[in-house]
Image (tube, grey):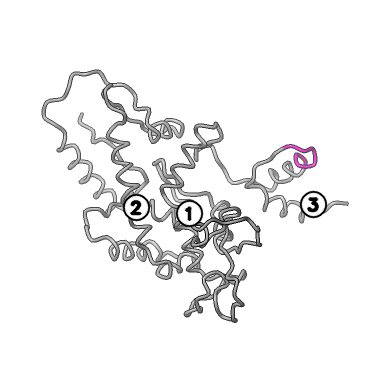
Amino acid sequence: DFMLEDISVSSDETAEDDLAYMLEEADINDEEPEEQSEEAKIPCNAPRCRLARKMKLVAGEMQQHLTKCRRCSIFETDLQVVAGWEAKIRPADAIEYLQNPSAKKNRKSLEDLVKAIESNPQQIKPRRKNMLMNTLLIEIGRKSDGVDQPILESKAERMRADCVKLCPGCGAEEDEADATEPFCHECRFLKQNHDATPAGKCKACGIEDQGTRLAATGACLACGIKWLLRHNSSRKRFNDAVSELEDGSFTAAGDEREPTVADAAQAMVDRNHGRITDPRLVDKRVAANMENPAE
């Protein structure tokens, strides 16, 4: 039986997306040369496929003289396209994803956003839109079968908080290039506008709030989107995952689970004994402490 090669990097949730994948994969298979080389193939050891094996996903094969397989080439193109979208997004056009991250309309809204910034409709593919959804923390927790896994809700909540935090004043010396950056290169949070910021204006960019609420920190949500586009970009997520794979700290999404209050209680014991614990347990530790206050 003939089976189409699955080259998707994220899951589909609608029949329309499934059909789009089938057509796309058929087109890709049609591009294969009629005469296949008899050269023996070896497992691809490029970063994307090494991640895929760790995550128990399908990895590709390649001819011995190549450095990566077609799956990796396709994934690299996806990263380039999505990086282009991320660079074109006007932060003020995406603040709704921070205002109401779980809204059902966000997927359709993102579809319209992508169509507005991508001039070539053939570049708009379901898996690429899903990668952009990960960048903007939309529909966190949905299933995915690709290497760009949706972020855990606990981490997404921390990122939504971090993206509007202001630098406390690290005092680090900056060179000329750093001076133009909107983020502190030491703590990574938004730089504060050194001028006295009038009420109703963002303490980071100084722009007046135009119908959108400022975060409790005093930063505007547009600055929050700007932070996500930089510090949670598709390319950065992939590079971070590869770095974690190389240093042995990478954990496949299938092996992860949200920590429970029981986990948090144990984490408190571990902490008291000086043992390092999972950083995702920070908020749960507080919850456990409230339920089981110290005598």
Instruction: Say if mark 2 contacts mark 1, CB within 8 Å.
Output: no
Q: Earlier in the sequence, mark 3 or mark 1?
A: 1
Spatial CA distance of label 2 from label 3 is 46 Å
Q: Amino acid at mark 2?
A: Val
Q: Secondary structure at mark 1?
A: loop
Looking at marks 2 and 3 on the same chain, the residue that comes earlier in the sequence is marked by 2
For label 3, count other residues whose C-alpha is less than 10 Å away and answer few (under 14), some (14-19) or many (20+): few
In the rendered image, residue 21, in percent from the top left (x then y), is placed at: 26, 46
Kindly identify the residue that appears in the image at 15 percent across and 37 percent down.
31
Q: Nearer the viewer, residue 74 or 149?
A: 74
Secondary structure beneath label 2: helix
Q: Which residues are magenta?
A: 269-275
Q: Nearer the viewer, residue 33 or 180?
A: 180
164 or 142: nearer the viewer:
164
Q: Which numbered disc covers residue 292? A: 3
Discs 3, 1 touching: Cβ within 8 Å: no
270 in the magenta segment = yes
Residue 140 marker? 1
Q: Residues within 10 Å of mark 2 (few under 14, many from 20)?
A: many
Numbered circles on residues, count: 3
Residue 271: image x %, image y %?
76, 42
The amino acid marked with disc number 3 is: Asn
| Residue assigned mark 2 | 82
